[in-house]
Image (spheres, rainbow, N blue to C red):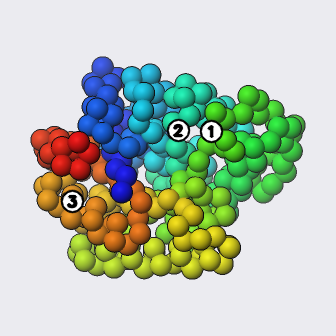
């Protein structure tokens, strides 16, 4: 099992830098931040840009993987996003993990997006497929329903070959097929649930669906990394070290290779005690 830690981009860098250093020093395998204009979970909170945050994090760390959780087409074009990814992959020495998803409703509304959910999923598929080409090829031509590229240059290409890994957020059948086609990894929230046991049942069902989708795509079940967002459950995984250890163990039993939690906040969403995070790190990562 590998362990990930999410640090929300709500802090000024003087406060955030020690958190990113600590994530690496505690032994986490990867560290993430959200990629939104505004996150619905904290609509009134301060919020900073994702790629500048990860670039700064790359400069104060040297080992830990750095990921977007998750980037979406809501306010990005694949060609311009490519340039940010190439720079970040280079600055981090090939530690970038590109999480990709359809995107949230709030970001979509802020920019006056009137697309239906189905259209947004269509756009996500085109976005991912074009971004995949841009990271592998030079002189890219594309004329699609949502994006165009005319002789898009992509030099120097990514540090990581054949390209920066995609971790694709997917709960529905179409996005699961996209993850099976283009994902080095799959990340899931497990779906909505009122109880923890109900949530685990949903997680197990989604994992089984991915198995079937991978088989249909001609891939082995073990050919893709599986990331579980533990804090999408009805409880916060860092309520206690014992709870986190139990949840990570159950995720492993279901075939997940990676689990992700959140840095404890003083109140509100993900409210918790940093001492619990440190205890988890001492038990599992030390």
Real-space CA distance between mark 1 and mark 3, rounded to the nearest whole angstrom: 32 Å
Q: Residue 197 sits in which quadrant?
A: bottom left
Mark 1: secondary structure: loop
Badge 2 density bin: few <14, some 14–19, many ≥20, Cα 10 Å: many
Decide: marks 1, 3 in contact (CB < 8 A)?
no
Residue tagged by mark 3? 245
Image position, residue 69 (x, y; %)? 45, 48
3 vs 2, front mark: 3
* Residue pictured at 59% horizontal, 27% vertical: 90
Q: Quarter of the image containing the C terminus?
A: top left
Relative to 182, say whether 275 is above or below. above
Q: Is residue 56 left or right of residue 270?
A: right
Q: Nearer the viewer, residue 25 or 109?
A: 25
Image position, residue 210 (x, y; %)? 53, 73
Q: How many marks?
A: 3
* Residue pictured at 81% horizontal, 33% vertical: 153
Going from the N terminus, do you reach mark 3 or mark 2 first?
A: 2
Q: Residue 174 sits in which quadrant?
A: bottom right
Mark 2: secondary structure: strand
Q: Nearer the viewer, residue 63 or 57?
A: 63
* Residue pictured at 59% horizontal, 48% vertical: 165
Relative to 227, say whether 22 is above or below. above
Mark 3: secondary structure: helix
Residue 240, numbered circle? none
Going from the N terminus, do you reach mark 1 or mark 3 first?
A: 1
Instruction: Mark yes or no: residue 53 visible.
Output: no
Going from the N terminus, do you reach mark 1 or mark 2 first?
A: 2
Residue tagged by mark 1? 160
Decide: marks 1, 2 in contact (CB < 8 A)?
yes
Image position, residue 88 (x, y; %)? 56, 30
Residue tagged by mark 2? 96
Q: Is residue 8 left or right of residue 263?
A: right
């Amino acid at each position: 099992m590998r362990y990930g830690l999410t640090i929300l981009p709500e802090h000024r860098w003087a406060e955030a830098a020690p958190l990113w250093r600590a994530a690496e020093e505690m032994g986490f395998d990867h560290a993430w931040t959200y990629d939104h204009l505004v996150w619905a979970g904290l609509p009134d909170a301060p919020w900073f840009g994702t790629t500048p945050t990860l670039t700064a994090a790359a400069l104060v760390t040297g080992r830990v993987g750095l990921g977007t959780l998750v980037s979406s087409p809501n306010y990005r074009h694949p060609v311009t996003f490519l340039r940010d990814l190439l720079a970040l992959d280079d600055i981090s020495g090939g530690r970038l993990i590109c999480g990709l998803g359809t995107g949230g409703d709030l970001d979509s509304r802020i920019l006056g997006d009137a697309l239906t959910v189905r259209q947004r999923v269509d756009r996500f598929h085109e976005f991912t497929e074009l971004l995949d080409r841009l990271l592998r090829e030079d002189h890219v031509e594309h004329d699609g329903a949502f994006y165009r590229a005319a002789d898009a240059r992509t030099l120097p290409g990514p540090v990581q070959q054949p390209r920066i890994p995609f971790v694709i957020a997917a709960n529905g059948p179409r996005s699961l097929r996209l993850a099976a086609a283009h994902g080095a990894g799959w990340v899931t929230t497990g779906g909505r649930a009122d109880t923890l046991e109900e949530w685990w049942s949903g997680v197990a069902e989604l994992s089984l669906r991915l198995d079937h989708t991978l088989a249909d795509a001609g891939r082995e079940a073990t050919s893709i990394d599986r990331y579980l967002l533990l804090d999408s459950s009805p409880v916060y995984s860092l309520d206690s070290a014992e709870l986190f250890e139990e949840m990570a163990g159950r995720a492993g039993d279901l075939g997940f290779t990676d689990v992700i939690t959140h840095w404890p906040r003083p109140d509100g969403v993900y409210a918790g005690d940093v001492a619990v995070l440190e205890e988890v790190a001492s038990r599992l990562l030390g």
